[in-house]
Amino acid sequence: MAVIRTIDLTKRFKDLVAVDHLNLDIEEGEIFGLLGPNGAGKTTTVLMLSTVIKPTGGTAVVGEYDIGKSPDDVRKLIGICFQEPKLLWVSTPWDVLNWHAKVCGLSTQERKKRVKQVLEDVNMWEHRRKNVHGLSGGMRKRVEIAKILIQRPKIAFIDEPTAQIDVVGKHKIWNMIQELREEGTTIILATNELHEADILSDRVGIMHKGKLLICDTPKTLKDSILGGDLVEIRLEKEATQDAFDELKSFHEVVDVVTVKPTNLKVHLNKVEEIVPKIMELFMKRNLPVTSISMSEPSLDDVFVHYTGLTIEEAQRKSP
Amino acid sequence: MKAVLHIIEYDFRNFFRYKWWLAGLISMNLADLLIMAVVYNKIVNPDLFLGQLKSYFNFFAPGVTVLGLFASAFMIGREVNMEVRREIHHYMLSLPITRLELAVGRLLAGGLRGMMYMTPLLLITFLFLGFPSPSQLLIILGALMLLATGISGLSIAAAVSITSFEKFVTARGLIYYVLFFCSSIFYPSSLIRTLGQDGLIPQPIVVLAELNPLSSGADLIRSFLIGTPIFTLEMIRNLAIFSMIFSTTSTLAYVKIIERK
């Protein structure tokens, strides 16, 4: 069941179309990765869905409420972790989170317990009384994420959760996002980190220049690249022409490159299904395989495939 | 109602976090009261306008109280403007509260902060000039709350309409000086009127001083503490109109303009 449905959702800032007729369904309980370079329209989409800014065209239904007609009801369902931490510099992490929990309706007892727990989880307990002004960028980001972990909303918008966070911290936050989903929160993860989108998302929507280019599971997206999988095979003996022809006859195989007579590179689809057949072929023809390695395309390859640009190139060209 | 209280709590907490700003404001108001009033007391010709007043200090103390109220209630605009510039207002707009609750909460917070800041100044004034009767005290506090809410509204409306910090600071300075000096804070209304009739002050300034809510606030305190000018309902009416106009303007501006930024 779709918990969010956008219908031709559009946002125009003067001459710039930040989001262009976005049509999207997000299922209840999933982590939906909204992937794209800076300036693709991800944050604008998040701000419209959370009723912070108004669309200039189209609409969206969040939960069962239209964002234009019932914004107050929408806001009761959602929580946002902003890309740039929205904190007054004179505040302290404790004040920010305690007040946030209060506004979100947590009881005094529950609030104190949860604020302490989350501050410890994001390694900010000992810094809880410091002014935001004195915190590093990564610490501020952790306070921003903590808001949503305390709130545990029905629908969470998380914008660039691990920007400015170190590698260890990233893994911790990814685990927390997954735990949040396990507790029943639907998560919309806006990110330009392909690896992050890949490991966290059930489905990914790729945005570029305000448009949604494609939307599916990471696996389907990777499989959609014709010949995107790569298998490298090393043989004890030279491959015969018959074996070579039979290999090429598999409909999953797109191309076979002979690096050496005993070393083949095979570009194909659905690597996990075809590898057993390849092994069988060489064994049947008495051509022992000494080694075989496989690699799947990444979401980087998917992004390049659909935009013609790497995400870094797209970022440089963004308005 | 609960949401409005949460917003008031948010703004009160932030108010006390700007320690140096507050220290500067307190120093300025105390200097006004304890240095300026005392110095002026020595240099002002008592025959010119003091009449039944014993000293310029007695005249000026209610004015400084209103100045303190103005400066502290106006401070909410500075914070709202900073939030808009740093896009912290996106966070406020994403909270599970209605736009009206948010706007009313900020308006009242600004006003209540002004009242809280002004209380010690008002007490000092009472100490030197004598305490009003309980009913007079209620009228003074009610009228000053109207004034504080109006000032808070005025500053919020300015803060969301002018995003640039430089322009906001300029506008704030302009509002400060126009309202401070075209008022009866430093000089009695009767003197301003006389000087206007004699052609020594341009007529628009005389009108502005008469309508200025700061004049009404200061004169209302004076009327109960020193007996001049005579208390009139017009003073409360002026404050109510000012408060109503800027409360409505700020609420509409906050809700409508801030969503576009």
Image (cartoon, coloured by chain):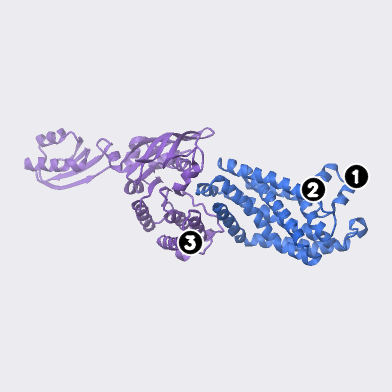
Chain colours: A purple, B blue
Report which quarter residue B65 is drawn in.
bottom right
- Amino acid type of the residue that numbered disc 3 sits on in the rendered structure: Thr
Task: Please name the amino acid that badge 1 sits on.
Answer: Gln
Residue identified by numbered label 2: B234
Which secondary structure lies at badge 2?
Answer: helix
Alpha-carbon distance for marks 1 and 3? Answer: 63 Å
**Sequence-wise first label, 2 or 1:** 1
The kind of secondary structure element at disc 1 is helix
Residue nearest the viewer, comparing B34 with B191: B191
Q: Tell me the CA gap for discs 2 and 1.
A: 21 Å
Q: Read off the residue under disc 3.
A: A108
Which residue is found at the position 63% from the left and 42% from the top?
Answer: B161
Give the chain letter at badge 1: B
Question: Numbered disc 2: what chain?
Answer: B
Q: Residues within 10 Å of mark 2 (few under 14, many from 20)?
A: few
Task: Please tell me whether residue A214 is drawn above or below residue A125 in the rendered image.
Answer: above
